[in-house]
Image: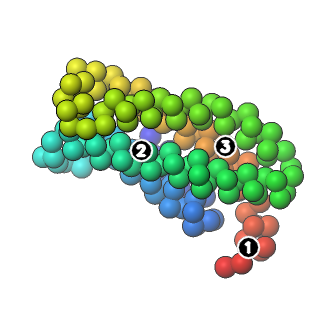
Amino acid sequence: MLEKCTNAKELWGGVHDLIDRWLNERREVIVRMFAIKGLPDSKKTDEPIERRVESFCEILVDYISAGHFEIYEQLMREAREFEDGGIELAEALFPRIQVTTELMLDFNDTYSGAEEVRAHLDTLESDVSQVAEALEERFELEDQLIQALHEVHRDKVLTTSPE
């Protein structure tokens, strides 16, 4: 999963500062998720599980929000400007992205505080696994959006945007 994240950053990183920051945030989502389970790519920590889950939820909600309220808006603006079929793709992908959003927000609600984490420790591992699967699907869908709505216009965007 981290390798795919790195590849996406190499493909689109630097094309637009907003997308660049968002891809960095995506990587942080993965790192913090791994820290919950103590997976190989996680940093070794003695941080309590409650704090690791809280930290993951914070970055997860930030990532989702940035996608919905910043990135997708920018991509749709470009799609409308270039009118080359990107809007239709976005309209097909957004409902699928929304399904992952709802699952992740449900996770956040379930594990919203230390007490909630302790109360759901028996389902935490399976819930994190579901979120991991949803994130993987979401990243693939978002990558399709970035490719179709931004990358194909990169040269035009770079020559027309004031920087």
Confirm whether residue 75 shows in the render: yes
Is residue 21 left or right of 51 when viewed as pictured? Answer: right
The residue where tag 2 is placed is: 60
> Residue type at mark 3?
Gln
Q: SS of the residue at dot 3?
A: helix
Badge nearest the viewer, 3 or 2 = 2
Kindly give the residue lying farthest to the right in the view shown: 83
Most foreground residue, 149 or 114 = 114
The residue where tag 3 is placed is: 144
Q: Say which residue appears at 20% left-offset and 37% top-offset.
A: 114
Other-residue count near label 1 (Cα within 10 Å), few / some / many at <14 / 14–19 / ≥20? few
> Residue type at mark 1?
Ser
Residue 39 location (% of width, % of height): 27, 37
Relative vertical location of residue 18 with respect to residue 42 in this rendering, above or below? below
Q: Is the image coloured rainbow, by chain, by secondary structure, or in one colour?
A: rainbow
Confirm whether residue 35 shows in the render: no
> Residue type at mark 2?
Leu
The residue where tag 1 is placed is: 161
